[in-house]
Image: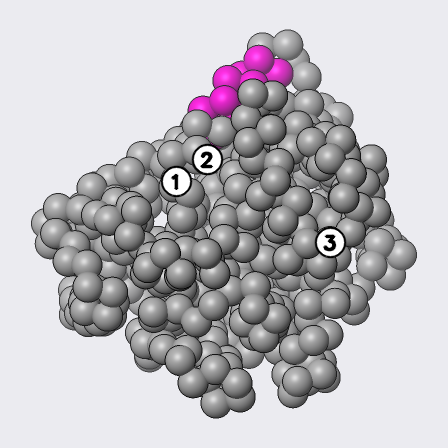
Amino acid sequence: MNRDVCAEFLRFTGFEESEIPGFLPDFIEACRALNLSEADVRFSVETWIPSQFDTELEGVRRGLGCIVREAVDLTRTPRYKKQGVKLVYGILPAMSVYYYALKRTAPDRVYVAFPDLFLVAFLQMFFHRLNPTLEIAEAAGMSYGCRHCALNKARFTARRLGIIPSPDISWIWGFVCDEGPKTDEFIQECFDSDWRNYSTRLPHDQPLGTQEDEVDERVEYLALQMRDGFEQVQRVVGISVPEEKIAEAFEIRQRFVEKMGELRDLLTVDPPPLGGVEAFILGMPRDMPFNTGLEPMAEALEQTLKDVRGRVAAGRGVLPRQAPVLMYEIIPYCQPWLVKMFMENGVGVMPGGPTQKQLQPPRFEDPYMVAAEAWLKGSVTVNAGYKADQICERLLRYKFDGLLLGFLDFDRWLGSDNRLIARMVEERTGLPVFYVEGDFWEDRDYSPESLRTRVESICEILKMRKAG
């Protein structure tokens, strides 16, 4: 592995020159563990990263570096286990507060992360190299034809290849993905009897349009589920987390959400000063725990706010003035080329930002009730009618020209949910809603060539509406 190429990769992803020599050996070792070659790293540095991400901005580079640090940290987990560090895994979607509270209580005694997420993001976002990982899981029985989620396949493969060891506990949030708990059972039954998991569930039993965060019984039920799961985790790892640590972690998360709101407000400037993929990546620690901490990404976000304000002051943007902008609810940031294709055709694709409710203080004092209410204020797990209400609010508040949905047809819940939401939003707002078939995590079934005509057609429709 060429050290100069690897060092250049780290520069591209926001590492300070002074820290590269110390981090480089672990990065090279991580590449070996993940079967990345020198050619893969060279492709990333010379072609992929500069063409896909706005690396002119220091804040963006540092945000990308946070993901690199987390992926490298993931490959250290076998070493952590030998040192007696307790390993707590999880999956999307989940409330990151509890993992951060655990980490803040015992920073040197526990590892917390969603291993599959960082494996997929690192391989696909930076190298476009996820397919071999998925094919290993498919050969073992996770059929390609059944469209299993790439995250579950990646978790299976990571354990199968020994990239990660058995966790002390895998706390699975089966709020949306009922396949997540089943994947852990598959790992346990197939080849790792030491893989221990605990599942927290929330039934989808609310009528369309119910504002679930305002139903106290619903909030209380979810809070109890969260408490039960977190208490189980604490028992298994032998670490007791004071409730004030949960409250502290929530306050840090809330400040982060408010900063993301500031960034989102800046993206309404004409022309928009930043692309949607970069904005989404900077918000990742809100919903997924980083073992390396939320604070580095918060610093990257602060730097990005400074960088973006500079562009606004100079009148610089990433699109022409008066360009149409689509809101995305869930866009595949692991496929940054898709958003770039829209931008090349003169249309922006941007995140919706928080709703007014999400920025309001909690109604409760109990930290579990606070976390449960926050979850139900703006989560993919609420009923489709309430999600449609939230999307409509953001569409109108930020004056979007339309909505982009899709990329979730592998998910039995969200795939059908999004189709229903598309119709409701279009009827309520009169704005065009576009649903695109695809996969959030991997792009074997679609490509720039196969989607180009569709994207170009959508962009032409939007530009004609804007001009009319």
Image height of 252 relative to 118, above or below: above
Number of residue marks: 3
Q: Which residues are magenta?
A: 301-312
Q: Position of residue 25 (x, y in %)?
A: 61, 40
Q: Position of residue 143 (x, y in %)?
A: 68, 84
Residue 326 seen anywhere in this rendered image of the structure? no
Quarter the C terminus occupies = top right
Q: Please give the residue where the numbered disc 1 appears in the rendered image.
A: 294
311 part of magenta stretch: yes
Mark 1 near mark 2, Cβ–Cβ under 8 Å?
yes
Q: Please give the residue where the numbered disc 3 appears in the rendered image.
A: 36
Q: Please give the residue where the numbered disc 2 appears in the rendered image.
A: 297
Q: Which SS does the magenta portion mostly show?
A: helix
Disc 2 marks a residue whose amino acid type is Met
Residue at the image point whose x is 50% and y is 49% from the top: 73
Q: Position of residue 400 (x, y in %)?
A: 58, 41
Q: Secondary structure at mark 1?
A: loop
Image height of 433 relative to 17, above or below: below
Of the image marks 2 and 3, the number of the one nearer the N terminus: 3
Mark 1 near mark 3, Cβ–Cβ under 8 Å?
no
Residue furthest out toward the front = 82
Residue 408 seen anywhere in this rendered image of the structure? yes
Q: Secondary structure at mark 3?
A: loop
Q: Nearer the viewer, residue 263 or 460?
A: 263
Image height of 130 relative to 261, above or below: below
Q: Secondary structure at mark 2?
A: helix
